[in-house]
Image (cartoon, rainbow, N blue to C red):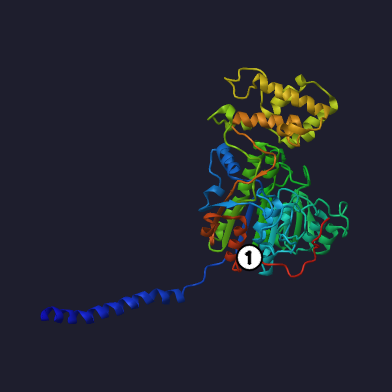
Amino acid sequence: MLNRICRLRMLVPLVLMGLVLLAGCAQEPVKTEAVKESPKTAKYVFLFIGDGMGLPQRAATAAYTGKQLAIDAMPAQGITTTFANDRFITGSAASATALASGIKTNINYIGVDPEFKPVKTIAEMAKEQGKKVGIVSSVSIDHATPAAFYAHVKTRKMYHEIDHALASSGFDFFGGGGLKDPTGRKSKAPMGDALNKARENGYSIVTDKGAFMALKPGDGKVLSWNKWLQDGQAMPYVMDMTPDDITLPEFTAKAIEMLDNDEGFFLMVEGGKIDWACHANDATASILNTLAFDDSVKQALAFYDAHPDETLIVVTGDHECGGLTLGFAGTKYASHFQVLGGQKVSFQKFTDEILKAFKEEGGSFEDMKPIITAQFGLKFDGDPKADQMVLAEFQAGELKAAFERSMNGETVKGGDYLLYGEYDPLSVTLTHLLNQKAGLGWTSYKHTGVPVSTSAVGVGAESFNGSYDNKDVATKIMAIMGLEPKPQYVTATGTRVASN
C-alpha cells in the first residue's frame, strides 16, 4: 500500500508537467489566430446574370452541344432561391434588386426596399471604392436587371427616369441594348433628353460596330448599343445576327478592356434574351443565347487566368422562365436535341419579317408549308416513325389551325392562352412542335419559382457553394469586395422614387 502511494506521489509532478505542456499547446493556435492575415479581397469583380436561366436552361444547352458549359465547370456551385418580398414567383426587377443590394423587395420595384427607400447597389459601392464600373445587357440597357444596379424607382416602367439615372450614374461603360424612353414621351413629368444629359456628363455614344471595336481605354466613358435593335430596344437573338452586329461576348470583351485599371473594376453582364426566348417557348433561341452568355463568361475567365489572385467571377440566374422541362410525354424517355438545329430563325424574326411579308402577299397553308420546312426543318411528307422531322397528321392539323388564326389576325382569348400565350399563333405552335420532337416541354409563358444555379471561381468563390437565397449573392460579393456584408441605404439620390 505504501509503495502504491509513493508511486502515485511520483506520478503527480509528471501529470502536472503534462497538463502544463498541453495547456501550452492549446494556447498556440490562439497566437497563430491573432497574427492570421485577413481574408483577401477581390480587385476585379464580375457578376453574370442569365435572365430566365434556370437549371433546365443550362442542362438543355449542354445537351444540345454535347459539351459542358464553362459556367458549369466552375469549382464553386450553389443552389439559389429567388422569391420576391410579396410573391413566390419573382420578377426581374425584384430579383435583380436582391442580387444588386441584398434587399428583398416587391415585384416591379427597382433599387428600393418595400417601403420605397433607395438601397445602395454593389455597383455603386464599387464606384465609391474607386473602381470603374460597367453594365452590359443583351436587352435594353434600361431594362429591369441592368437598371437595378444604378436606378432607384418605384416601378421598372419608369424608363425615362431610369434613363436619367443612367446618365447621372458616373459609371464608366454601358453596352448592349438601347434606351426605351430617353426623351420622356411616356413620362408624366419629362426631365429632358437623357442622351443629351449623358453627353453633357462625358459619355461618348457609339452604335457603329467599327467605331465600337476601335474604342480604347483612354476614350473615356462610353454608352454603346448595337445598331440593329430587334424588339423593345434589345439586341437581336443570336441566331438572327449578321456580321454587322455586336455580340454579347464582344460587348463583354470591350467592357473588360475599357474598365481595366490599377484600382480594379466591377462588371455586370446580363444575358437578357434567354428570358425573352423562354417567354415565347422558343428553346432553340434560348439555347443559342445561353451559349453566347457562356461565351461572354469565357471572356472573364481569360481575364481571370491573368489575374487569378485578384479576381472573382460569379454567375447566376434571376429566375427560371417558361417552366422548361427536359422530357415530353410524346417521346417518353427519348431525347432528340439535334432536331433543334433545323430551326434557322427565332420566333421573333419569323413573326416580324417572314410571316409579315407572307401576310402582305397573301397565300394558302400549302404556300406556307415550304417556308416552314426551310425555317424550322419540319416536314409534311414522309413517315414520322422513320424521320423525326416529319409531322404527324394531327400535328399538321395544329399548324393549319394556328396558321388560319394568324392570317385572320385573331386575338387570343380565354383558354386559347394555354395554346399560344400572347404570341403569334403560328410562330409559337411551330416552336412548340419542334421542341416536343426534341423531347422538351413548357408549362408557362411566364417565370417559375424553381431555384437557379449559382457558380463562381476566384477570390472567395468557396462561399458560393451550398444553398442560399439570391439576396445572399449580393452580401457575399460585398464581403469579398472588403465591404460590410449587409444591405446599405442611399442617403441622397437625384432620382425620384415615385409612381409614374
- Quarter in which the N terminus is drawn: bottom left
Three-letter amino acid code of the residue under disc 1: Gly
Which residue lies at the image location 78% right of the left edge and 31% below the top edge?
A: 354
State the residue in front, 61 or 476.
476
Which residue lies at the image location 22% right of the left edge and 80% below the top edge?
A: 12
Decide: few, some or many residues near mark 1? Use Cα within 10 Å; few <14, some 14-19, many ≥20: many
**Residue 238 image position (x, y, % from top left):** 69, 41
**Residue 382 image position (x, y, % from top left):** 63, 17
Residue 190 is at least partly visible in this image = yes
Q: Element under label 1?
A: loop
State the residue in front, 304 or 367.
367
Which residue lies at the image location 74% right of the left edge and 37% below the top edge?
A: 348
According to the picture, the residue beneath numbered tag 1 turns out to be 264
Res. 244 image quadrant: top right
Q: In the figure, 37 relative to 406: above or below?
A: below
Res. 427 image quadrant: top right
State the residue in front, 245 or 120.
120
Residue 254 is at least partly visible in this image = no
* Side of 110 where 4 appears, left or right: left
**Residue 236 image position (x, y, % from top left):** 73, 42
Res. 349 image quadrant: top right
Which residue lies at the image location 54% right of the left edge and 52% below the top edge?
A: 78
* Side of 276 where 463 appears, left or right: left
Q: Of all residues shown, which one is farthest toward the top?
A: 382
**Residue 122 image position (x, y, % from top left):** 66, 63
State the residue in front, 492 or 204.
492
- Quarter in which the C terminus is drawn: bottom right
Disc tally is 1
Q: Of all residues shown, which one is farthest toward the front?
A: 1
